[in-house]
Amino acid sequence: KERRSIMAPVEKVEKEETEARAAMADEMKKVVSKMKEELVEEEVEEQEEAEPLDDKSCDEKYAKALEQINGVDGKYDEAIDLLTEVLEYKCGKFGELAIECAPAFYNYGVALFSKARLENDVFGEPVQKAMVEKAISQMKQEAEKGSKNEEEEGEDVNKEEEAVEDDEEEDDMELAWRNLETARLIYTNQGGHEKEIADVYATLAELSMEREDFETSTSDFKSAIGVISNVPKCERILAEYHYKLCIALQLRAACQNQAQSAKDALLKESTKECQTAQSLLKSLAEEATEGGVKEELETCIEELQMKIEELSSQQVETNNRVGAPSSSSQMGFDAAQLGCGKENLGVVGRGVNRVSLAPVKKRNNVPPQAAAQEPEVKKQKHLS
């Protein structure tokens, strides 16, 4: 009994050690298995990259790129890489200005624009950049103080890094514009692609709006409306464009460097565009037979009425301020008032953040730039 009582703890420890070694062995097997799977996946990817594209694999990459653009997560980097390969293949096979390349040029521009806009979003790059800068600042405070020359050198390096980041954003926007313009050129020269041309104009308008170039934005939205007006059964898209033009005009009216009469005229035009969108949706609601569609249209009509009332009140406020000193830099236009709850109006399921409208976006490996043939005046109009 004494021997057993002495040996019991030893046996218990040995048992625990045996179980621990077995568990560790199982864990190692899982790790090795996972590493093997990753290696296989990498080999498959390398093999796919090494294999030349054909029509089938090109179509598969294009379809996958559209899924990445239109997905909830918006994996734009992956879409850009895929569309780079697609464009290289199609341009090599058909020529840069062939109609077969137009959808890829368009969606490549959309992916670049969406990526740049996401990075410029409130919850995107600026916040991350601010967090990094705060962490660096804290580290500097905790570290020993260096000489003034070292501090000046550090500031210069930070400024250079910020300049590089700004240039990268500009490159994305400019490259997006070039590819969208290339798609517009191809569709225009071919003829019979009115809907696609309107989609390109609308995306160009949103790009200009993102850059706060509201004059160009309103012009491009008007071009989109002029083209899509001649296409049958596109009333919902037309209503969407009228509403977005309304928003662009309202934002343009909020600019400071304008006379009161010009602001008033822009607000009146904005109201008219909103009323047009409402009228189009009312006609569609009357013809709708499905209960869900009719209910959705009626909700959008109510929201448009709220926007019309908001614009009317802003016109009154603007008129009341004519000749009177103003302390407000935006003449009553608060950022929170510029939306009406649902900016996409429920129109064909496409909103401001989803601009992939084509029928069918590696900066280091840029596809052919056919848009470089465009006049410089046109480029400056959109990018100034």
Image (cartoon, grey):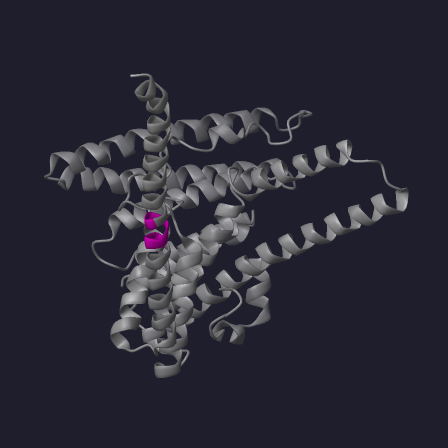
- Residue 215 screen position, x and y as percent: 54, 50
Q: Residue furthest front?
A: 2
| 57 is within the stretch colored magenta | no
Query: What residue is rendered at 56% in x and 65% in y?
Result: 379
Which quarter of the rendered picture does the C terminus lie within? Answer: bottom right
- Residue 235 screen position, x and y as percent: 25, 49
The mark tally for this picture is: 0
Magenta extent: 29-34
Q: Residue furthest left?
A: 289
Is 197 above or below relative to 265? below
Is 189 above or below relative to 359? below
Left or right of residue 290: residue 352: right
Left or right of residue 197: residue 254: right
Query: What residue is rendered at 39% in x and 40% in y?
Result: 272
Looking at the picture, tell me which residue is in the foreground, 325 or 241: 241
Looking at the picture, tell me which residue is in the foreground, 339 or 126: 126
Is 236 above or below relative to 35? above
Query: What residue is rendered at 71% in x and 32% in y?
Result: 138
Q: Is residue 356 visible?
A: no
Location of residue 278 (image quadrant):
top left
- Residue 132 screen position, x and y as percent: 63, 39
Which quarter of the rendered picture does the N terminus lie within? Answer: top left
Q: Is residue 59 visible?
A: yes
Left or right of residue 198: residue 155: right
Looking at the picture, tell me which residue is in the foreground, 331 or 199: 199
